[in-house]
Amino acid sequence: MAKKAKQPVISMPVVNHHAAGIDVGGRFHMVCPRQGEVQRFGVVTQELHRLAHYLQEQGVKSVAMESTGYHWKPLFLLLQDYGFETILVNARHIKNVKGRKTDVVDSQWIQLLHSLGLLDASFQLDNLTEELRQYTRQRRYLVEQRSKFVNKMHAALVQMNIQLGTVLSDLTGKSGQAIIQAILQGQRDGKALAQLADWRVKASQEQIEQALEGNWREELLFELEQCYELYHVFGQKIAKCDERIEQLLQTETVNQGVAQEPYPGKKKTAEE
């Protein structure tokens, strides 16, 4: 739920009309896309992607955040990969700007200063951050490539008039993957396939069964099988990237002598 914060009066011209401010934390991040609205997000990978999608939905183009410890790095690099102009600001610089009211939350104050053009980037790319950037870019590339095989699986099913996408919101979820796997193992009975759907699926068993009655074609089943296998191969490669990133952040944590917060790790859901 969005947290309503008291809106300060702006008496200076706005320079950045699509600016957001983020108060970076070890357990959660507070995001302000505009004055009067603050949203909280977690630090795991799924939450960071949800944060980025939220900023896109809000029309944000530029993001400012404090250089707090090492917690900013995964979020900073991910937002850059999403195409946001991302500004890292020294916390001392933010505190030195006069005029802040005590009831204005940190993320809202950062957003206000950024929208007025009062923040200067202080980020210098060190060797560790550059290495981290390479891993996160590779991870994003793999996620993008994997999504192509999801689309191709959907296309192969539709061409056989298997309308699984009309009864399931996500082919890569538990139900979708179980049904596709059974199809590839030779199951053609719609009723048997429908029973593999999770009980939480909104569509009825009858609706799912009807959606799974189609025209089975060998060449499309072959394509479906290859795309299914490649989807999971890319998933394994993404998990390898997560391991490298986690190792890198743990190394930095040891060097800094602070307690490690879990890195945004491997996702348990299909969405990345």
Image: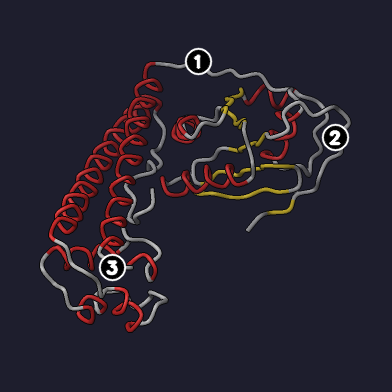
Residue at 34%, 45% in the rendered image: 265
Residue at 18% from the left image edge and 63% from the top image edge: 181
- Measured in 3D between alpha carbons, the distance from the residue under mark 2 to the one under mark 3, in whole angstroms, is 56 Å
Farthest residue to the right: give it: 11
Sequence-wise first label, 2 or 3 = 2
Q: How far is disc 3 from disc 1 in space, using C-alphas?
A: 52 Å
The nearer-to-camera label among 3 and 1 is 3
Question: What residue would you read off at disc 1?
Answer: 124
Q: Compared to 77, does 121 lie above or below?
A: above
| Secondary element at image label 3 | loop
Query: Residue 163's x, y, as percent?
Result: 33, 68
For the residue pair 189 and 17, the one nearer the viewer reads as: 189
Q: Say the numbered circle drawn on residue 10.
A: 2
Disc 2: CA contacts within 10 A as few (<14), some (14-19) or many (>=20):
few
Residue 59 point in image, percent of width and height: 64, 41
Residue that appears at 62% across and 50% down: 39
Please give the residue where the numbered disc 3 appears in the rendered image.
162
Q: Left or right: where does residue 170 sit relative to residue 90? A: left
2 vs 3, front mark: 3
Q: Earlier in the sequence, mark 1 or mark 2?
A: 2
Label 3 environment density (alpha carbons within 10 Å; few <14, some 14–19, many ≥20): many
